[in-house]
Amino acid sequence: MLIYKLTMINNLSVISNNPLVSFTILLLVVLTLPPIFEKLRLPGLVGLLFAGVILGENGLKFLDADSESIKLFSDIGKIYLMFVAGLEIDMGEFRKNKDRSLGFGAMTFFIPLLLGSLVGRYFGFGWNSSILIGSLLASHTLLGFPIVQRLGIVKNESVMVTIGATIFTDIAALLILAICVSIHGGEFSTTSLVIQLLSLAIYATAVLFGLDWVGQEYFRRTGDEESNQFLFVLLAVFLASVGAQAINVDKIVGAFLAGLAVNDVVGDGPVKEKVEFVGGTLFIPFFFVGMGLLLDIPAFINTIQLEFPLVIGIVGGLIVAKLLAALTAKVLYRYSWHEGLTMWSLSLPQVAATLAAALAAYEAKNVAGEGLINEAVFNTVIVLMLVTSILGPILTAQFGKKIPLPTTSRELDSELEETSLDEWLPQLQSEMSFAPFTVVIPIYNPRTQRDLIAMGALLARHESGIIVPVSIASAYVHMDDAQLNSNLRRSQTLLNRALEISQEFQVEAEPIIRIDDDVAHGISRTAREQDASLIIMGWSENTGLRARLFGNVIDSVFWSSHCPVAVMRLLDQPDNLHRLLVPVKNLSPATINVIEFAQLFANANQASVTLLHVCDRSSSAVQIALFRQELTQVIDQSGLSVKCKIKVISHDDVAKVILRASSAFDLVILRSFRRRTAGGLGVSDLTTELLKKLTCSLVLFGEPHS
């Protein structure tokens, strides 16, 4: 029995120190636990922390927090976390509201900093540790951003100000961390502090402006070489992290600055999504598992029991301080109560910068081997993260839904100019006027070819335009390659059939065969060359690994096209689709483009259009009446004699209402966004659900600049 136990202990030791085994266990954890915890309505990162506790020293001992492999994975995850935090900040929105963003950023930073420092001093910590504790409360993580995005209030000024304030709070918190760690590591002197600040200022300037310039030049020269651009971004973040350590600053400061530096370079393009996909799928989850491994459960329980006043002081101090900051901003900027409370709820969650900074402070040792913060504070920060990551999004959902949707606006010359419908609707109509009207129709699947040609023909005939069927033949190195010849013959057969179908509908067609390395690029470039007014494509159910990693053809065309794209899943012939349903969330230029497309098809096919708006149950009669009035104005000024019906329903489950209503219609037209994701089309959670469950024909309509 003794030999058996010794063998088991030895095996466990081998497992915990084997990098390959550790990596395999981490992959299994990341794949399985977050979805389980999310079904329990808990943040997925709580599941990762839980896994770290169970697999670590206090549990099964499968993973060792002190092993080199775990330290490496955790460090990369921490760097990646702060890099993505900087990358996700919308610099454009920050610039539009920079004065108020900086104002609220200062309030929501210095008030928690002051209260946190006082809490630290009250519980006997030195000034350096107390100020560090205050800085841990001063930053915030925008966990509630997907909620305000779903509610359609991202453009509300109070929300944009809160988002912009993240830049100030995160940079200031990391700056204080750098100074406190530097002071903790050696003897304090004014000279050393000045030198540290100067070196940090020079370093930050070099990273923010140097990486930005180098990145712009590199991306300009490399064009569509996404793989090399991806590697350049990775090199930038880790180079900045190493540079931070060289000037005695924590590596997460460099990672965050690198994120801000390459923010404008990568934009919202495919490189950014690949960077975030790799980080969000692998390394950032590894960091949270590593945090769980560091948790000493007996000490954690003791902290809550024996240091309960400290826990209440830090957690309660954060909640009160963030509330005071939000209420101050409400009064100064004359926001409503719901806007002020939404700012409070958005600034509550303490995850990214807080956890990374807390870990850095906990691991920072002085000559006596003491950390900048002790285990009790570190455990309290974990409690703080759990409380705020759950409470913040809940409060955001409650307060955010009571904020009225922003008034209709249009983005011109990269500046948001508030205008009325009367001012910008005629301009929008002139942009959407299809003259000459050219419809590009990529042809690949013979089974869907007829319906796509028929749809394009209906629209082109109504607008006295033409259709351009295009078939992409995959290119090879040698133009006499047998496979290329076979592809060209197939393309010619498809286009001959397309020409026959167009003649049935008495529409002029100009078929094109294009040889291209990339199908999506071939489609979008052909559309640009033909000055297309619209691209019509068939629906693809491609959800394989390659599509998940790099997106499918539809996704790429949506992203790169210069004109609107209509992706269709037709279950009946287009000329039999006479009852059209268009869900309308809010009135924006992009939404009106969708309505105009529906009216255009309805006018060409003698169909009727129903505009369905599902509002929150708390919406007042005045709000509903105002929305109806604006929607009616859009219909009246469209210039198309189409029978349109407006239907407004108050309900909490938008998808359920749309699905129930769709049973009485032939075609549902949904809006897409010009945003690529690692999982395919850039659509909302609502649209994703509808795409899976709709049983009638549908069109997913997207346009440039959306």
Image (cartoon, grey):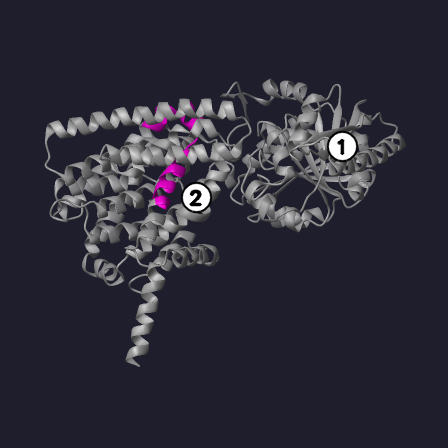
- The residue that label 1 is drawn on is 601
In the rendered image, residue 562, in percent from the top left (x then y), is placed at 63, 25
Question: Is residue 216 left or right of 54 when viewed as pictured?
Answer: right
Range of residues picked out in magenta? 76-102
From the viewer's perspective, is residue 200 above or below residue 375?
above
The Cα–Cα distance between marks 1 and 2, rounded to whole angstroms, is 43 Å
Residue 330 visible in this rendered orientation of the protein: no
Q: Residues within 10 Å of mark 1 (few under 14, many from 20)?
A: many
In the rendered image, residue 124, in percent from the top left (x then y), is placed at 12, 48
Between 195 and 421, the residue placed more toward the observer is 195
Residue 247 sits in quarter: top left
Question: Is residue 495 left or right of 260 when viewed as pictured?
Answer: right
Question: Is residue 580 left or right of 506 when viewed as pictured?
Answer: left
Q: Helix or strand or loop: what does disc 2 sit on?
A: helix
Between 127 and 398, the residue placed more toward the observer is 127
Label whose residue precedes the other's in the sequence (1 or 2): 2
From the viewer's perspective, is residue 65 above or below residue 158?
below
Amino acid found under the numbered disc labelled 2: Gly
Which residue shows up at 48% across the image and 29% down it?
Answer: 267
Specify the principal SS of the magenta part: helix
* Disc number placed over residue 279 in the picture, else none: 2
Which residue shows up at 38% across the image and 42% down it?
Answer: 81
Looking at the rendered image, the quarter that the C terminus falls into is top right
Extreme residue in the bottom direction: 1
In the rendered image, residue 467, in percent from the top left (x then y), is placed at 79, 27
Q: Does 91 lie within the magenta span?
A: yes
Q: Residues within 10 Å of mark 2 (few under 14, many from 20)?
A: many
Question: Is residue 251 left or right of 554 when viewed as pictured?
Answer: left
From the viewer's perspective, is residue 11 above or below residue 680?
below
| Front: mark 1 or 2 | 2
Q: Does 453 lie within the magenta span?
A: no
Q: Helix or strand or loop: what does disc 1 sit on?
A: helix
